[in-house]
């Protein structure tokens, strides 16, 4: 009976190795990019509230993907600990998303548009809510729950990629001064 309970998790091992590796690699790349642009002069300094609202969540989302990949790859003896930890992770993500919404509404460095609200708040909320739903379903209907978890992790991965690209292109085009004008 034990093998039958754990077999749904075992079938997803390669998926979570790939997704977890991608999340860890992309997190590292964010640190490299931030380090590279840290010394650049800015036309308009982006205050900490802009960074906390638009950049930090990418690291959180990639970290959540890495956490879920680790949770679902661990050799659990039963599904209930995975379900509990996944539900707590989803709840933590929902709480963090509420914090991001609050920060986006109160920051002054940039006025978010519909695309920003979708990618920075709505889509992450859907993903983290999916984790909570999947955590509830995991003990009863493990196969559909695992597909919900997979969809949530892939969504968070794409959210992080989209938002990191959006942040970098915004920074490169809108905020960074050309070197020759900064010395005038």
Image: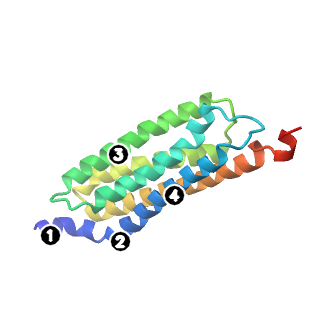
Name the residue tied to disc 4: 26
* In this picture, residue 157 sits left or right of residue 142: right
Name the residue tied to disc 1: 3
- Give the x, y percent position of residue 52: 56, 36
Could you give the CA–CA distance between mark 2 and mark 3, rounded to whole angstroms? 21 Å
Image quarter of residue 106 = top right
Nearest the viewer among 32 and 144 is 32
- Give the x, y percent position of residue 87: 31, 46
Q: Residue furthest front?
A: 183
**Residue count near mark 2 (Cα–Cα under 10 Å), binned few <14, some 14–19, many ≥20:** few
Image quarter of residue 3 = bottom left
Label 3 residue SS: helix
Q: Nearer the viewer, mark 2 or mark 4?
A: 4
Q: Residue furthest right?
A: 184
Quadrant including the N terminus? bottom left
Earlier-in-chain disc, 2 versus 3: 2
* In this picture, residue 166 sits left or right of residue 142: right
Name the residue tied to disc 3: 89
Name the residue tied to disc 2: 14
Could you give the CA–CA distance between mark 3 and mark 4, rounded to whole angstroms? 20 Å
- Give the x, y percent position of residue 147: 37, 63
Could you give the CA–CA distance between mark 2 and mark 4, rounded to whole angstroms? 18 Å
Is residue 12 in view from this perspective?
A: no
Earlier-in-chain disc, 4 versus 1: 1
Q: Nearer the viewer, mark 4 or mark 1?
A: 4
Nearest the viewer among 130 and 174 is 174
Residue at (42% x, 40% y) in the render: 94
- Give the x, y percent position of residue 129: 40, 47
Q: Nearer the viewer, mark 3 or mark 4?
A: 4
Nearest the viewer among 5 and 156 is 156
């Amino acid at each position: 009976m034990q093998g039958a309970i754990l077999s749904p998790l075992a079938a997803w091992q390669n998926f979570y190795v790939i997704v977890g590796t991608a999340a860890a690699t992309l997190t590292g790349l964010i640190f490299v990019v931030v380090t590279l642009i840290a010394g650049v002069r800015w036309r308009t300094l982006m205050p900490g509230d802009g960074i906390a609202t638009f950049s930090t969540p990418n690291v959180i989302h990639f970290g959540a993907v890495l956490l879920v990949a680790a949770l679902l790859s661990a050799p659990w003896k039963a599904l209930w600990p995975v379900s509990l930890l996944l539900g707590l992770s989803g709840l933590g993500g929902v709480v963090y998303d509420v914090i991001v919404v609050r920060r986006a509404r109160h920051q002054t460095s940039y006025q978010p548009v519909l695309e920003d609200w979708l990618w920075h708040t709505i889509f992450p909320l859907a993903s983290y809510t999916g984790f909570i739903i999947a955590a509830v379903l995991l003990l009863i209907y493990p196969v559909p729950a695992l597909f919900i978890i997979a969809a949530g992790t892939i969504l968070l991965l794409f959210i992080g990629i989209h938002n990191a690209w959006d942040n970098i292109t915004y920074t490169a085009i809108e905020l960074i001064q050309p070197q020759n004008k900064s010395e005038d």
